[in-house]
Amino acid sequence: DTGVSQDPRHKITKRGQNVTFRCDPISEHNRLYWYRQTLGQGPEFLTYFQNEAQLEKSRLLSDRFSAERPKGSFSTLEIQRTEQGDSAMYLCASSPLGGGTYEQYFGPGTRLTVT
Amino acid sequence: SQQGEEDPQALSIQEGENATMNCSYKTSINNLQWYRQNSGRGLVHLILIRSNEREKHSGRLRVTLDTSKKSSSLLITASRAADTASYFCAPRSNDYKLSFGAGTTVTVRA
């Protein structure tokens, strides 16, 4: 299967700890997105990369959050000094650059629980 | 970007029945997409309809778009247990991020 993969699938951490998630997009996709989803809500946009350039960050992404996409391939999302409010599903998606379609392909998500 | 608002919040139907859900948005769009999310397969793209299209079909799915009313509907015909999921619309006025509403939760009863 060559879909979007995310690792880990589940993460339980104590408040104040740092966590890092990884996303591997579909190999030929230039664009990579991070979303966050809490229970009963739709996903909320966090940030977006085109190749290795981070082109937009949501106001939801506080200074404790940082995302990278070195070499325009996989991406990491790091949360420093986690808080209970960070508990959520973190979704990664990718899409091709341009073209006539703009659908995004989502990974299975990383569920973060902060205790 | 703008957020779609799905209606109703929840829908329960008998297997074999049709399910209809609606999406409203506020400003002009380039296209509107529908996604489905269930616990087994995550968030999956279902169908995209462009602003110059009024209706589109894909298998048992039918999507309509009325840009004058800024609304869209998704019809699932002959529902199956596997259609039990949350459905989200994503109206797009740019070409990158998606903005989802809270979704419509569909339960198909056997």
Image (cartoon, coloured by chain):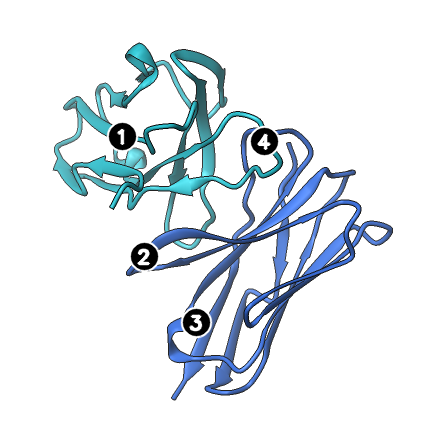
Chain colours: A cyan, B blue
Q: CA distance from mark 3 to mark 1?
A: 28 Å
Task: Give the chain letter at badge 2.
Answer: B
Q: Position of residue A28 (x, y in %)?
A: 38, 28
The one of B102 and B43 positioned closer to us in this rendering = B43
Task: Report, in whole angstroms, how far the alpha carbon at label 3 lies from the one at label 2.
Answer: 12 Å
Label 1 resides on the chain identified as A
Residue A26 in picture, x, y percent from top left = 34, 33
Question: Mark 4 and 2 residues: CB-CB less than 8 Å, in contact?
Answer: no
User: Mark 3 belongs to which subunit?
Assistant: B
**Is there one chain holding both mark 3 and mark 4?**
no
Please tell me whether mark 4 sits on a helix, a strand or a loop.
loop
Q: Is residue A36 above or below residue B57?
A: above
Q: Which residue is mark 2?
A: B41
Q: How far apart, in angstroms, are the residues tagged by discs 3 and 4?
A: 29 Å
The structure residue drawn at horizontal position 76% and vertical position 45%, both measured from the top left corner, is B51
Q: Which mark is residue B34?
A: none
Do marks 4 and 2 share a chain? no
Tell me the tag on residue B83.
3
First reached walking from the N terminus: tag 1 or tag 4? 1
Asked whether residue A115 is in view, the answer is no
For the point 38% across and 37% down, the residue is A36
Q: Residue at x 52, y 53 (%)?
A: B102
**Tag 2: amino acid:** Arg
Identify the secondary structure beneath mark 1: strand
In which image quadrant can residue A70 be found? top left
Between marks 1 and 2, how big is the CA–CA gap? Answer: 17 Å
Q: Which residue is mark 4?
A: A99
- Comparing marks 3 and 4, which lies closer to the viewer? 4
- Give the labeled residue for mark 1: A24
Whole-Å distance between the Cαs marked 4 and 2?
26 Å
Q: Reading the chain from its start, which is encountered first: label 3 or label 2?
A: 2
From the viewer's perspective, tell me whether residue A11 is left or right of residue B49: left
